[in-house]
Image (tube, rainbow, N blue to C red):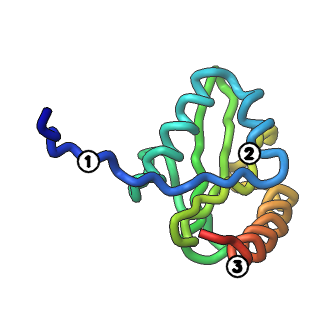
Amino acid sequence: MAASGFKSPLLQRIIWMGDSLEVVRLFPKAVRDEVGFALYEAQLGGKHVNAKALRGLGTGMLEGVSEFRGDTYRAIYTVRFKNRIYVLHAFQKKSKRGIATPAREIELVRRRLKQAMVLDQTRED
């Protein structure tokens, strides 16, 4: 039987930092699906329509935003490392004032980004 010529794309590996995977698993199914699709698009080198650059932490930082029944959910991930996507944090935004990511959430992302940098430098491919 001849090969079809279709080649499956090589997906970048996803690394979940801290409790980010457990938190995403608690999101409503529609939100989990949207976060999953955003990460899949990132694995392929693309960017989800609801993902935006997260400013202040350098290049390659993205924040996926999902709205569901009046609530806002966010997943913050980085695509700055070769062949790896690090999901740094996921949370439900509680504040109804403004769209800015709360400072305590940014500080947690900053700590996990530093951990991801160390992890990425010591990885074996």
Q: Secondary structure at mark 1?
A: loop
Figure quadrant of the N terminus: top left
Circle 3 Cα neighbour tier, 10 Å, few/some/many (<14 / 14–19 / ≥20): few
Q: In the image, what residue occupies the spot 75% across and 70% down? A: 119
Residue 98 lies, in percent from the top left, at 70, 49
- At label 2, the amino acid type is Ala
Q: CA distance from mark 2 to mark 3?
A: 23 Å
Residue 112 lies, in percent from the top left, at 80, 64
- In the rendered view, does 81 fall on the left or right side of 95? left
Which of the marked residues, 1 or 3, is nearer the chain's N terminus? 1
In which quarter of the view is residue 72 placed? top right
Which of the marked residues, 1 or 2, is nearer the chain's N terminus? 1
Between 87 and 96, the one lying in front of the other is: 87
Q: CA distance from mark 1 to mark 2?
A: 33 Å
Which numbered circle lies on residue 90?
2
Examine the rendered structure and indicate whether residue 1 appears above or below residue 47. above
Circle 1 Cα neighbour tier, 10 Å, few/some/many (<14 / 14–19 / ≥20): few
Q: Secondary structure at mark 3?
A: helix
Q: In the image, what residue occupies the spot 70% across and 79% down? A: 121
Which numbered circle lies on residue 121?
3
Q: Is residue 96 visible?
A: no
Depth check, mark 2 against mark 3: the one in front is 3
Q: Secondary structure at mark 2?
A: strand
Q: In the image, what residue occupies the spot 61% across and 63% down? A: 78
- At label 1, the amino acid type is Lys
- In the rendered view, does 87 fall on the left or right side of 11? right
Between 81 and 52, the one lying in front of the other is: 81
Q: CA distance from mark 1 to mark 3?
A: 30 Å
- In the rendered view, does 115 fall on the left or right side of 80? right
Depth check, mark 1 against mark 2: the one in front is 1
